[in-house]
Amino acid sequence: MEFHYLIFSGPTTPQMRSQRLSEFWGQGDIYAKDFGMESFDEFYSRVRVFLQRLRSISDDANIVVFTHGFLLQAILYQLENGFPESSSLVMKEIHERCFLRPIGNGEVIVFDKSELFGI
C-alpha cells in the first residue's frame, strides 16, 4: 500500500532526485501524476477505504498490518485529525510528519480499535 508518485528514469544523482522531490512536495498539487503514477488524492482515498474496512472488522479481532512509514503517517494523520478531506494542506502536513515524527524501520505501533474510532 505504499505511495508511488514519481518515476526516475536513467541514471540520476541524489541532487537530481532531491530537486524533483522538492518540486513535487512544494507544488502541493494533490492531483499531480508523474507518468500515470498515483496522485496524492488517490493515495489518500485508499487510506480512507482501508480505515473504513478496518472499522468494519469484529471488535475482538487482532489485526496485524505490515506497511511503509508514509502510509502509517497518513493513517495516523486521518485518525488524529478527524478524517479530513484531501487537500494541499493535508498533503503538506502528512509530508512534514515524516520528518517531525519519523516512524522507524520495524517499528511497532499498537492501535486499540475502540480508542481509534470512539467505539
Image: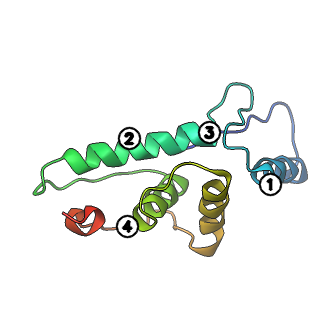
Which residue, given by chain and number where applicable, does mark 2 sit on?
49
Q: Percent x, y for residue 86?
A: 56, 48
Dot 4 corresponds to which residue? 108
> In the image, which is nearer the foreground, mark 4 or mark 2?
2
Q: Are the two marked residues, 4 and 3, in contact with CB atoms closer than 8 angstroms? A: no
The amino acid marked with disc number 1 is Gly
Residue occupied by mark 3? 4
User: In this view of the protein, which residue sits in the foreground, 44 or 82?
Assistant: 82
Instruction: Name the foreground residue: 59 vs 98.
Output: 59
- The mark nearer the N terminus, 2 or 3, is 3
Q: Furthest-left residue in view?
A: 60
Q: Is residue 64 rendered to the left or right of residue 22? A: left
Residue depicted at x 58% and y 41%: 41
Q: Badge 1 is on which residue?
A: 26
Q: Name the residue type under label 3.
A: His
In this rendering, would 21 be left or right of 39?
A: right
Three-letter residue code for mark 2: Val
**Secondary structure type for disc 4:** loop
Between the residue at mark 2 and the residue at mark 3, the CA separation in whole angstroms equals 18 Å
Q: CA distance from mark 4 to mark 3?
A: 23 Å
Q: Quadrant of residue 83?
A: bottom left
Q: Please tell me how crowded label 1 is: few (under 14), some (14-19), or many (20+) other residues with Cα within 10 Å.
A: few
